[in-house]
Every structure is written in C-alpha cells, then in structure tokens.
C-alpha cells in the first residue's frame, strides 16, 4: 500500500511508481492526483486535510481484505501502464521532435 497525504501535488512521480508496481494507493484529492486515481476503482482519494478516522478505516480495510487490495492494485497498475507505456512514450517523443523539424 502507498499513502500520500500531500497538501499540494504537481506530477506525482512516487505515486505513479507505486501504482505501476500494483500497490493500492490512498492519496489526497489535490493537484494532479485526481487525473490518475479513480476513487474506489484504482485507488482512493481523500479530501485534504484527511479525516483521521476515515484514513485509518480505509487502511484497515485494505489490510483486512487482501483480495480487494490486490484488485485495486491491479487496476492501478493497468491504468498507469496504459498512460505511460514505452510505446506511448516513444510515440509522444517522435511527435514532439517532428514539431521542431
């Protein structure tokens, strides 16, 4: 599990890496994080500042339900890899280079 309780967030590299590893993630609903996380599908978004009871309950639920935790983690992995595959990265770079040639 990966938990990020940032107040501000730009490009969340650590979160992206955690999702790519298939970890279920819990993060605050700030900055670019909602672009990566669909609440209760491939991770969980909490308002900032997070409600402590809600956070603890969510962490405990993930720990007590390994099948659900694994499913969320796999959804996280699939969603991130669909956005950041090598093929898409290379195509984006080629497109960028073509703009300057």
Image (spheres, rainbow, N blue to C red):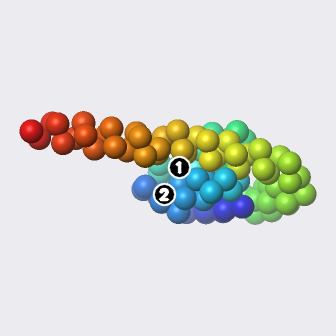
> Mark on residue 82?
none
- As drawn, is 65 to the left or to the right of 99? right
Residue 31: image x %, image y %? 47, 51
> Which secondary structure, mark 1?
helix
Residue 86: image x %, image y %? 43, 46
**Few, some or many residues within 10 Å of mark 2 (<14, 14–19, 20+):** some
> Disc 2 or 1, which lies upstream in sequence?
2
Residue 46 vs 41, above or below: the answer is below
Q: Quadrant of the C terminus?
A: top left
Residue at 79% over, 51% down: 69
> Which secondary structure, mark 2?
loop
Asked which quadrant contains residue 59, the reply is bottom right
Residue 80: image x %, image y %? 55, 45
Q: Judge by depth and name the residue closer to the eye, 95 or 52.
A: 95
Residue at the spot of label 2? 12
Residue at 76% over, 59% down: 55
**Few, some or many residues within 10 Å of mark 1 (<14, 14–19, 20+):** many
Q: Judge by depth and name the residue closer to the eye, 82 or 86.
A: 86
Residue 3: image x %, image y %? 66, 62
Outermost residue to the right: 64
Residue at 11% over, 41% down: 100
**Contact check, label 2 and label 1, Cβ < 8 Å:** yes
Q: Judge by depth and name the residue closer to the eye, 2 or 80.
A: 80
- As drawn, is 28 to the left or to the right of 68? left
Residue 67 visible in rendering: yes
Residue at 43% over, 55% down: 11
Q: Judge by depth and name the residue closer to the eye, 44 or 75.
A: 75
Asked which quadrant contains residue 36, the reply is top right
Residue at the spot of label 1? 33
- As drawn, is 66 to the left or to the right of 25? right
Residue 87 vs 70, above or below: the answer is above
Q: Quadrant of the N terminus?
A: bottom right
């Amino acid at each position: 599990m990966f938990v990020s309780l940032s107040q501000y967030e730009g490009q969340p590299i650590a979160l992206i890496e955690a999702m790519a590893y298939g970890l279920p993630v819990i993060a605050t609903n700030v900055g670019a994080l909602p672009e990566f996380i669909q609440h209760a599908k491939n991770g969980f978004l909490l308002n900032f500042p997070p409600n402590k009871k809600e956070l603890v309950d969510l962490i405990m639920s993930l720990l007590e339900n390994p099948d659900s935790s694994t499913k969320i983690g796999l959804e996280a992995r699939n969603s991130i890899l669909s956005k950041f595959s090598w093929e898409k990265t290379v195509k984006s770079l080629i497109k960028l280079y073509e703009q300057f040639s």
